[in-house]
Image: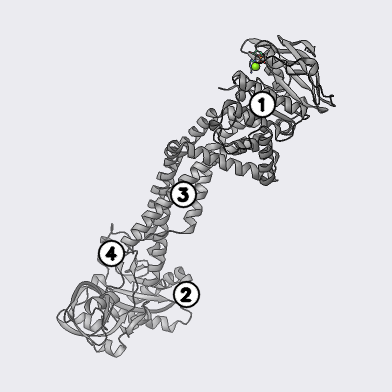
Amino acid sequence: MSPPAPVETRPVRPVGPLVIAIEGVTKLYQMGEETIHALRGVTLDIRRNEYLAIMGPSGSGKSTLMNMLGCLDTPTSGKYEFNGNDVAAMTDDELAEIRNREIGFVFQTFNLLPRSDALRNVELPLIYAGVPSGERHERARLALESVGLGNRIHHKPNELSGGQRQRVAVARALVNRPSIILADEPTGNLDSKTGVEILALFEDLYEAGNTLIVVTHEEAVARHARRVIRLHDGLIESDGHVY
Amino acid sequence: MNRIIYEFTESVRIALAQIRANKLRSALTALGVIIGIVAVTLMGTAIEGINTGFDKSLAMLGDDVLYVNKWPWTGAEDWWNYADRPPLRPEDAVKLNRIISSSPDSELEFGVFGDSRSASLKSAGNSVSGVFTRGTTAGYARILTADFEEGRMFNETEDESARQVVVLGYDVAQALFPGRSALGATVAIHGQPFQVIGVLARQGSFLGLFSFDNQMVMPLGAYRKYFGIRDDNTEIQVKIRDKTHLDNAREELTGLMRRVRGDIPGQRDSFSINGGAVFKEKLDPIKKGIALAGLFVTGLSLFVGAIGIMNITFVSVKERTKEIGTRKALGARRVTILLQFLIEAVSICVLGGIVGLGLTYLMFAAVRSGMPSFPIEFSPALVVVSMLVSVVTGVLSGVVPAWGASRLDPVVALRYE
Ligand SMILES: Nc1ncnc2c1ncn2[C@@H]1O[C@H](COP(=O)(O)OP(=O)(O)O)[C@@H](O)[C@H]1O
Ligand SMILES: [Mg+2]
């Protein structure tokens, strides 16, 4: 990774209203006899226009927290409010709705549909949102343009480089104009040069007014965020503007 | 609800892409369905063919005609029970008609005596053998269902004076006088000259087996003179007034014939009444046999096909667990995932069904052009039935794996490698 820009020169956008409020959240996994405490009581507020990194060693609960924030999973105990709504009380379909409209996921392994071209992949959240096809194409095309892939919209994933695939995934995360974009190790499968490109893209997204949460175990990645949360063994160890 | 429509079309697109990507696997999986659909549609063409062929043929035979014979048409197992019945005679028909005309509300209209056999005949240049030859009275004109291509039936005078005139079936006339009119020509039957006074219009064949056009009709007197009457074979054809009252007519005819024949009360009938329902019943076991065999093959291959498709859908769900997780993360609801895999299973079945239907149609077309009179029919109902069967098979075989897929925990699915 290239060295980070000096902290003081980076713009920090004023934060907006509260999006995520979690309080005393725990998550237990039962592995046969053994109970694993993946999260032991996490309290966290995230506001609009934040650029947040969640750090921690492997097994510290980063992905678990991330899944929770992304409404893929519900807490074993504790409170989770998304835009003021109690997530614990939601049905599976309501959670699907929240994920569709409010959250954009970027995965370490890109998770693109291999047989669909870039445009189709980016359209997918819009299909689930019930957007008519004309509007769907247009918005997907614009999203791909915004990540610099306007000339690749009909390429299949296997016709794209790793960095381009992750850009498609970012476009897919953006296309439904979510409240937050959640990225779990977004550069984990990329070489450092392409990783930097993706982080530059995140910087652009942040400056354009998006809310970003990036899970990483790399300091170099976390350094790009404006706020860093460090997890250790299922608990928040530190939370603040580290750099 | 637009969303469902978009999700549906998306699912169909995905399913077809999936099938295209796994051509061989899908084809092998669809094999069971293909065989099943071929079996069910072939069965359908055969049964339908028999039905339409039967109705057509029955109309040719006269579906408003009952036959009084010495023997019943069904079952020859107990022939000795009928062997000592006295033969049916021309006088029986005369007596019968006398009773019928004196009872005004009779269900019966008219009876005509006849005998038949196979004979050969010659014209100047040609000869035909194995012609179904009927000797009967002039009243037969009222029973005959065929139209006349040319000429007419013999009349009572010709009948009573045993004139040597004959009415030819279409094929017989064609064979003897190709491309010419047979009317007025003389043919040799049994070495005797007969004058052709009529040619029947083309009728076709009974179930493609027995041709109605390979026949001739002559006055009973002439017939008796050259062929003799075979007692075992004589019959009285009785036209009924209303074919929807077949059972009443049969009952009445039984009573009248007992009177005509002087059967003693308490004693069994000295004759058998054939035709109508008896005739239809005769085909029922054939149709049932075809249906049973067809259903067995269909059921078995659809069952095997369904298991194959269930298996392939399980594999597909397993292979794409991560994709399911991704889709759920992007906002796919349970019903969306359920629909996706259900549609995939149904698509394989429907494609299999279309192929099966196509194969059946090709076979049908081949048989049709090779053997035009073979009793098969290809109807639009078969298309509907086979598509329905395909869809139901697809739903039944896809529902369990698809349900499982829809219930997957997105977190677990996303972690799946
Ligand atoms: N689905 C699960 N079932 C059982 N244990 C799990 C599951 N998911 C995570 N864990 C456990 O919870 C802990 C936290 O995992 P995770 O959140 O994936 O950590 P990180 O992403 O920080 O590496 C680990 O000990 C992991 O083994
Ligand atoms: Mg992790």
**Mark 4 Cα shell of 10 Å, populated few (<14), some (14-19), many (≥20):** some
**Chain ID at mark 4:** B
CA gap, disc 3 to disc 4? 53 Å
Is the C-beta separation of discs 1 and 4 under 8 Å?
no
CA gap, disc 2 to disc 3? 45 Å
Which residue was labeled with disc 1? A106
CA gap, disc 1 to disc 4? 91 Å
Is B266 or B86 nearer to us in this picture? B86
| Residue type at tag 4 | Tyr
| Disc 4: residue Cβ within 8 A of ligand 1's nearest atom | no
- SS for dot 4: helix
Which residue was labeled with disc 4? B82
Name which of mark 4 and mark 2 comes first in the sequence.
4
Front of the two marks 2 and 3: 3
Query: At which x and y percent is residue B67?
Result: 35, 71
**Chain ID at mark 2:** B
Horizontally, residue B329 falls left or right of residue B175, namely right
Front of the two marks 3 and 1: 1
Front of the two marks 3 and 4: 3
Marks 1, 2 in one chain: no
**Mark 1 Cα shell of 10 Å, populated few (<14), some (14-19), many (≥20):** many
- SS for dot 3: helix
Query: At which x and y percent is residue A119?
Result: 62, 38
Marks 2, 3 in one chain: yes
Which residue was labeled with disc 2? B242
Query: At which x and y percent is residue B19?
Result: 49, 39
Front of the two marks 1 and 2: 1
In the picture, residue A143 is in which quadrant? top right
Pick the quarter of the image with the N terminus of chain A: top right
Pick the quarter of the image with the C terminus of chain A: top right
